[in-house]
Amino acid sequence: MTKTATLSPFETAAPRLVDVAMGRAPADLVIRGGRWVNVHSGEIIPNTDIAIRDGRFAYCGPDASHAIGAGTEVVEAEGRYLVPGLCDAHMHVESGMVTVTEFCRAVIPHGTTSMFIDPHEIANVLGLPGVRLMHDEAMAQPVNVFVQMPSCVPSAPGLEEGGAELGAAEIAEAMAWPNIVGLGEVMNFPGVAANDLVMTGAIEATRRAGKTVGGHYASPDLGLPFHGYVAGGPEDDHEGTRASDAAARVRQGMKAMLRLGSAWYDVAEQVKAVTEMGLDSRHFILCTDDCHSGTLVRDGHMDRVVRHAIAQGLKPITAIQMATLNTAEHFGLARELGSIAPGRRADLLLVSDLATLSIDAVYARGMKLAEAGRLVANLPAYPYPAEAKSTVRLGKHLSAEDFAVKAPEGSNAAHVRVIGVVENQAPTRALEARLPIVDGFVEPDAAADVCHIALVERHRATGLVSNAFVSGFGYSVPCALASTVAHDSHHMIVVGTSRDNMARAANRLGEVGGGVVFFAGGEEKAMVEMPIAGLMSNERAEIVAEKADRLIEAMRQAGCTLNNAYMQHSLLALVVIPSLRISDKGLVDVDRFEIVDLFL
């Protein structure tokens, strides 16, 4: 059993920190002879000792021998870099398919010691009680997991109906919870620009609480709607994809969050605002947004993002600032985390190579949690109550006919709108296609890479199924993928070339209580069970990653070569990112924020 890290409030710990710094009291831990990556000054200072007491840094200087007592643990850095623990400024735990505890288990060895999570996925299923479940689990972790209160539940009122609704009153209530640091991404950007009362009330409640308002402006239009959105109060944005997007945010006083997730590769273009345009890097922040378990287990988390940013031309210390101090300052927590400096939480990494961010050990609150890429701390499983499960309510047994699209009378072919997937980006394209009609029903066209997509209502057991078409997955055999992870209202999305397989996949998820499953040729090929709200598994991250690998391989064998196709699949109902999406109300033109007909 690993000893639990203790963290005293600064006000309580300060006298003891002073005594350690002055040599009047011993430190709990001293790390000697490291190269101090100082994100405040932008320097790397050799031959530095670090002394830690009560989970906080007490002394950072050339010689901490005066702080070593009989009970002090001494670690020799041997010239390795002392790097602040990494911060993920914007992310959704549910995208990892696992609980907060299992997410931490996966990312701590990769150097992440602070996370700012927006649990709007579980909020859309379970409402305020679901947010409280994740809030309380976050507080039980040995690292810093702060929570942003979901702002848009549902994300686009009038265009979808989810499993819950949260208004200004619920947001104001949550602002008093101990671990809430701000308002989650405000996705209803037309609502902010139009002074929608729900949006203005949510932002007002957050500002009155003195907390940070997260942004989400998912439009390429940098004209008046953008200016109106910024004037409404959001303080950051992670939805940019171009250097001009990042520059526009920073020029308006926002923080530009550059994301590298499992399927979103938005750092390379936007970081040119720093490397080529010369803008001040202190207003840029790195984040992941969405990472599935396979990425976490194999490729990393914020260490992966920092390495990628360095590869785009940033100095290592600049990239590290963008993943540490910049984040802490943005959330008003620079006196608590984001740097190795007296008074801050003792979150640090021992790194043998800075450019590749080769992490030898991870400390949080002065305790070693990981070494040589392996967790050495004990993270007990967090129990979720029964009411957080059994949330998939289909209302009936689905058949192939539920996924059929009846053709207009008197036509030989149907001219339809088609959702076009954009590889490695969140936006979709609004495409068109002429599809064949057989026995009165519109059929997909495998040769043109157009297949069925359906949204199955799963919160109120209505039996409703919305049908349309999607392009980009490349399936070449009769198959279907169904998922109850369907941002943001989290109904069930089913994509396939065969209506029979679509029905089988949807019914299977109803049986197991949610997750993602792939059928081909009428047989189940792979499944990841996610019984917690239909969003998260209760298994270890590495087990979930193995199941996800089998899922990806099954999709590949069916002809899908799209990078992180499951992640793309899960966002096809996200009706706040252009251009074309599906909801329980039909097809949504997100450029105009209105329901449109399938047929042209």
Image (tube, rainbow, N blue to C red):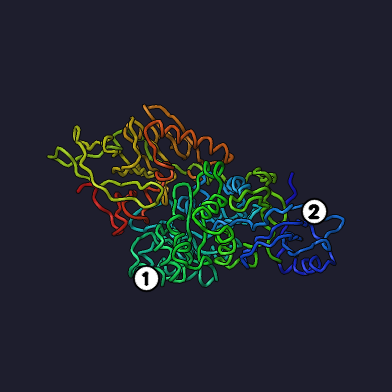
The answer to whether residue 527 is left or right of residue 595 is right
Is disc 2 surrounded by few (<14), some (14 to 19) or many (20+) residues within 10 Å?
some
Q: Which mark is residue 549?
A: none
Looking at the image, can residue 91 be seen? Answer: no
Do tag 2 and tag 1 residues touch (Cβ < 8 Å)? no
Does residue 140 lie above or below 177 as drawn?
above
Which residue occupies 39% across, 40% down?
A: 562
Q: Position of residue 197 (x, y in %)?
A: 39, 68
The image quadrant that residue 35 belongs to is bottom right
Please indicate whether residue 14 sits to the left or right of residue 525 in the image.
right
**Which quadrant holds residue 523?**
top left
Q: Position of residue 401 (x, y in %)?
A: 28, 34
Q: Nearer the viewer, residue 554 or 209?
A: 554
Residue ID at (59%, 48%):
107
- Return the residue nearer the eye: 434 or 284: 284
The amino acid at mark 2 is: Val
Amino acid under label 1? Gly
Secondary structure of the residue carrying numbered label 1: helix
Write the residue at 37% across / 33% down.
Answer: 559
Which residue is label 2 attached to?
74
Q: Which residue is mark 1?
A: 228
Pinpoint residue 530: horizontal percent, then vertical percent.
50, 40
Does the rendering let one see residue 187?
yes
Q: Residue drawn 20% across and 33% down? A: 438
Of residues 396 and 77, the one nearer the viewer is 77
Indicate whether 372 appears above or below 71: above
Using the numbered discs, state the Cα–Cα distance from disc 2 to disc 1 in whole angstroms. 55 Å
Q: Is residue 568 above or below residue 212?
A: above
Q: Quadrant of the N terminus?
A: top right
Mark 1 Cα-neighbour bin, 10 Å: few <14, some 14–19, many ≥20: some
**Sequence-wise first label, 2 or 1:** 2
Along the line of sight, the residue nearer the viewer: 304 or 517:
304
